[in-house]
Amino acid sequence: MDTSLLAPLALYSFVCTATPGPNNIMLASSGLVFGFRRTIPHIFGINFGCALMLVLSGLGLGALFEAWPVLRWAVRIFGAVYLGWLAVKLWQSEGVERREGSHPLTFFQAAAFQFVNPKAWAITMPAIASFTVPGRPLALQLGVIVAAFVLVGLPSIATWAAMGAGARELLESRKGMIVFVRVMAVLTALTALLFLI
């Protein structure tokens, strides 16, 4: 990889991971409902899932989406359904009082979600195309791209979970908490609809 690409790669990683999207809305909601500590596996699952997607995109999986556009639509539809289900669960959570059997996403659930998250695909495939240089060792270039996303992305997405957990302290009244949780549920549902546009 050309060293002149390192600063743009770091900036790209930051913008892609710090801006609102399905992952960050879900992390803020999880931080709010379950607290930061219980959301940590979710944070690391997102990071791992995106790193794996970067590697797979670099090895040619992204080309399948270009060859078969129906796969892209299948991912969008599945992602929208999954986010819709999460929005309903969040709406029903009634603030920080957890229902019986309610728990945050696990590491593996969060990692698997990346594969049906259109924003994740929209981030990873262009990253490979933009930050790899033909004729240079692909493994090394993929390693640098993954490292940038992990090192820059981890604190970026963790901030969203921390903001949700912080809102938990600020929203002392039950009514205020329920309103906030339901706003997050609506945002999650709207994100699901955006998957289909």
Image (tube, rainbow, N blue to C red):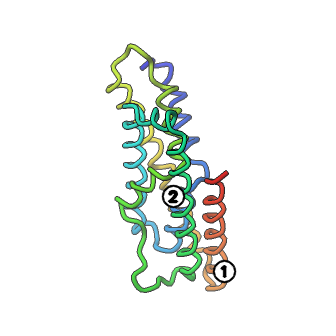
Picture disc at residue 192: none
Residue at (45% x, 66% y) in the render: 36
Give the quadrant of residue 55. top left
**Amino acid type of the residue that numbered disc 2 sits on in the rendered structure:** Phe
Residue identified by numbered label 1: 176
Q: Earlier in the sequence, mark 1 or mark 2?
A: 2
Viewed as shown, does residue 59 lie left or right of 190? left
- Mark 1 element type: helix
Residue identified by numbered label 2: 78
Mark 1 or 2: in front is 2
Residue at (37% x, 31% y) in the render: 59
Task: From the viewer's side, name the closer residue of 135 and 179.
Answer: 135
Which corner quadrant holds the N terminus? top left
- Mark 2 element type: helix
Within 10 Å of the Cα at label 1, are there few (<14), some (14-19), or many (20+) other Cα atoms? Answer: some
Residue 194 in picture, x, y percent from top left: 65, 54
Viewed as shown, does residue 76 lie left or right of 37? right
Within 10 Å of the Cα at label 2, are there few (<14), some (14-19), or many (20+) other Cα atoms? Answer: some
Residue 123 in picture, x, y percent from top left: 53, 40
State whether residue 128 is above or below residue 160. above
Give the quadrant of residue 160. bottom right
Residue 90 in picture, x, y percent from top left: 55, 74
State whether residue 91 is above or below residue 55. below
Task: From the viewer's side, name the closer residue of 154 and 69.
Answer: 69
Give the quadrant of residue 169. bottom right
Task: From the viewer's side, name the closer residue of 165 and 18.
Answer: 18
Residue 73 in picture, x, y percent from top left: 56, 48
